[in-house]
Amino acid sequence: MKRRLLLAAALAVPSVAAPAIVRAQGTWPNKTVKFICPFAPGGGTDTVSRLMCDQLSKNLGQTFVVENKGGAGGNIGTVELSRATPDGYTIGLISVASHTLNPMLYSRLPYNPDKDIVAISRVAILANLLGVTPSLPANNVAELIALCKKDPGKYSFASSGPGTSLHLSGELFKKLADVDIIHVPYKGAGPVYSDLMAGIVNMMFANMPSMLPQVRSGKLRGLGVTSAQRSKAAPDIPAIAETVPGYVATSWYGIGAPAGTPEPILARLETAIAGALKSADIQKRWNDDLGLDMPPPGRAGFDQFLADDRKLWEPAVKASGVKLD
């Protein structure tokens, strides 16, 4: 009799738990949501993460808090995102690093971008910007190439870490411009700027949101953008491709959640993100201040976009010869 009662109680648990889960989903979010940015503070990923969280907080009536988890080319934070409880209270930034480059660069990637993370929406498309320390005697890409050819191995370019889009933008430049410059990896783009301004490193390919304000303020000199054409946000800065034919290296940011996150929560996030991207504040910051283009929001077409993006970056990965463990 006792055994039958225990069995009945065990079988009754799902019928009690299921409505509780439905109620929790229906009231989501009812507490603070953690937003993982898999890069250090101070870079473009950090800026975009904080601006999006501000808007999501307004749209959904709960606080969205950015937690920076930098390191290993974004893998540390991305792994944490992929392994988080799929209840809508941990989401995070996904990017060209997590979903395009790292799957091609790492022989043992500790997450599967297509299975472990739901890509909810892209939020920005961007070019990188080549900036140099003001003391460097080069006012354009052609002069920079001549300078590097004159003294092979003398000059250095910084990045936010091996295998990042910033690193690969530099490696592709080395290959196509046929120059010998030394790669100096940092733990995130933010820490580079003081060394770059001081001339400890000579140049960096950085995301537009973090580099463009430094160029506009005169702290750095912008020589070229990595998109095929000039950026609408900085039309006075040439595309590197104008000097180095065939050079293209563009990036993107998006928002993802752990696989298994309930569909009602994903749908609400998707709607909230689309609303955030339509806000006057985000439109202004993207277009006027940060040099970002606005992608189509939502999950529709994301898989095809990823397939196309991986084809776009494959030549840069091959040219770099980089393989990471």
Image (cartoon, rainbow, N blue to C red):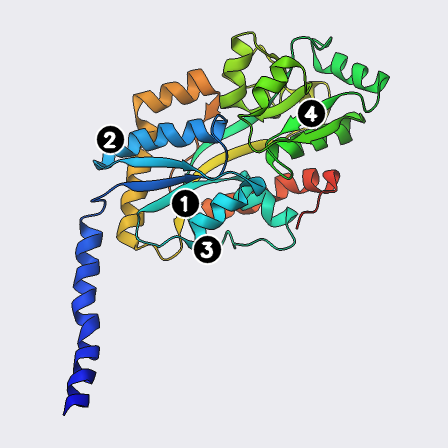
Query: Dot 3: few (<14), some (14–19), or many (≥20) neighbours within 10 Å?
Result: some
Query: Residue 168: which quarter of the image?
Result: top right
Q: Secondary structure at mark 2?
A: helix
Which comes before the other along the chain, label 1 or label 2? 2
Where residue 325 appears, as percent x and y from the top left, is 66, 51
Where residue 145 appears, as percent x and y from the top left, is 77, 18
Question: In this figure, which residue is indicated by the disc labeled 2?
Answer: 58
Question: In this figure, which residue is indicated by the disc labeled 1?
Answer: 256
In the image, residue 228 above or below residue 260: above
Quadrant position of the N terminus in the picture: bottom left
Front residue of 58/272: it is 58
Name the residue located 27 percent from the left edge and 44 percent from the top edge.
268
Which comes before the other along the chain, label 3 or label 2? 2
Q: Are marks 3 and 2 in contact (CB under 8 Å)?
A: no
In the image, residue 300 above or below residue 280: below
Which comes before the other along the chain, label 4 or label 3? 3
Measure the alpha-carbon separation of dots 1 and 2: 19 Å
Select label 4 or label 1 by which is in front: 4
Measure the alpha-carbon separation of dots 4 and 3: 33 Å
What is the three-letter code of the residue carrying label 2? Lys
> Furthest-bottom residue in view?
1
Q: Are marks 2 and 4 in contact (CB under 8 Å)?
A: no
Left-right relation of 241 to 147: left
Question: In this figure, which residue is indicated by the disc labeled 4?
Answer: 157
Query: Dot 4: few (<14), some (14–19), or many (≥20) neighbours within 10 Å?
Result: many
Which comes before the other along the chain, label 4 or label 1? 4
What is the three-letter code of the residue carrying label 4? Phe
What is the three-letter code of the residue carrying label 1? Gly
Question: In this figure, which residue is indicated by the disc labeled 3?
Answer: 116
